[in-house]
Image (cartoon, grey):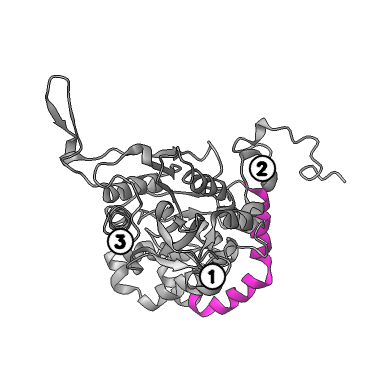
Amino acid sequence: MANATSVGLIGIVLLARHGDRSGVLFQNYTTYDSTQGYLTPYGASQEYDLGSYLRETYLNSASSSYIQGIATDVADVDQLFIRADAGGGDVTLDSAYALLQGLYPPTTESQITLANGTTVEAPLGGYQYIPVESLEFWQAPSLTSWMDCFYFQDHLARLNTGTVFENLTAQAAPFLQAVQPYLNGVNGSFLNIIYDYLNVQYTHNATFYNSFPETLLQQARYFADLHEQNVFTDSVNNGIGQIAIRTLWPEIFWSLGNMTLPNNTVKLALTEVDYKPFISLFSVTDATLTNPEISGIADYASAVAFELSLSSAGDYIVALKFKNGTNDAELKPLQMFGQNNLTLPQLIQQLDSTTINSTNNWCFSCNQTVLRGCSVFNFSNDPFINGVN
């Protein structure tokens, strides 16, 4: 841990979860292939509020967490790097846009003066159009690395037939029996994530809301948290169960590293994702050892922040913070590997062996030779993929 006093934030790297969505998530429990829904007005409001909070925290020059030199009112797009998963119904991509509306709201300063002297203000009261890099499912596996990953499916199969889920199924039996009348034909086994169905109905269906006991929703969330915590963790940090964060580390390290360079302009990097990387991130950094309450599914519009600062001793320091949706009023500090903060080289050294830093590496790590861009690589002589001794 670096103990020297910080002289200010240089930048931040954020992971944010999407907001409330329409419809029930279809997620095959044997593969975890899924389709997105669409962002609801409620979800857009959640993301907007998150953006507003981040604005007050990092873009307010009076804040102790102010990012030195960042544009506060009119966005400087060269200072921002934003990307989001664009698969399916675009709930994640649209969530990024909603968050940015709160981070950089409309302003009359968003204007331009033409050569003839005419001043033109951006539409919608000075709406700010901030570019978002959308990553389609077929372009690269980095944001949805568990999908079409055969070794991850093997990991699921072991869990689904193993003693951990067998014992949890037995523990959940009274709940599963009590909730059956409310499922409307949805598969009610422990292996199927029925919490999502119940939560969507409880949020958007007034008849269901008035008849469904809230205690059953709480139990559904409890068992869903246990289920997903097992799915997206592993016994070792470079295990396939941690893959949701392993493909994101290279981008996180790259963004933090670039922020230390004298010619760098990016001060805030944001990746909009779903809940899965949060679980793996907290597992591989040992954050759940000191804060076990963060285990399981992060709520809608949750955010993780890697804050980069320069200490008075000249070291680049990284601190980890987490805001669990609307349940938390502010970002709360988390420990990594039992430390309040780490130097950037220490963080990379701890996690570098866990990273999957290219599509080629993902194909190898997942035993995938055809889908998601893997067909362009020659694996014919690979002894691991082809089972050659």
Tell me the kind of residue under disc 2: Asn
* Magenta stretch holds residue 155: yes
Residue depth check, mark 1 versus mark 3: number of the one nearer the observer: 1
Badge 3 element: helix
* 314 is within the stretch colored magenta: no
Foreground of the two, 65 or 245: 65
Q: Residue at x 79, y 45 (%)?
A: 384
Magenta region: 149-176
Q: Nearer the viewer, residue 317 or 19?
A: 317
Q: Would you name the residue on which mark 2 appears?
A: 361
Question: Along the polypeptide, which appears first: circle 3 or circle 2?
Answer: 3
Question: In the structure shown, which secondary structural element does the residue marked by tag 2 occupy?
Answer: helix
Q: Residue at x 48, y 46 (%)?
A: 260
Q: Which disc number belongs to residue 78?
A: none
Q: Is residue 147 above or below residue 231?
A: above
User: Residue 352: x and y, percent?
Assistant: 63, 52
Left or right, residue 248 beside residue 63: right
Distance CA(mark 1)–CA(mark 2): 28 Å
Going by the numbered disc 3, the residue's amino acid type is: His
Residue at the limit of the structure toward the front, as seen here: 313
Could you give the CA–CA distance between mark 1 and mark 3, rounded to whole angstroms? 32 Å
Q: Where in the figure is residue 263, as x and y percent of width and height?
A: 45, 37
Left or right: 249 with respect to 197?
A: right
Quadrant in the picture for the N terminus: bottom right
Residue where numbered disc 3 is placed = 204
Which residue carries the number 1 mark?
288
Residue 71 vertical position relative to residue 120 in the rendered view, above or below: below
Mark with earlier residue (1, 3)? 3
Q: Residues within 10 Å of mark 3 (few under 14, many from 20)?
A: few
Residue 229 seen: yes
Residue 184 visible in rendering: no
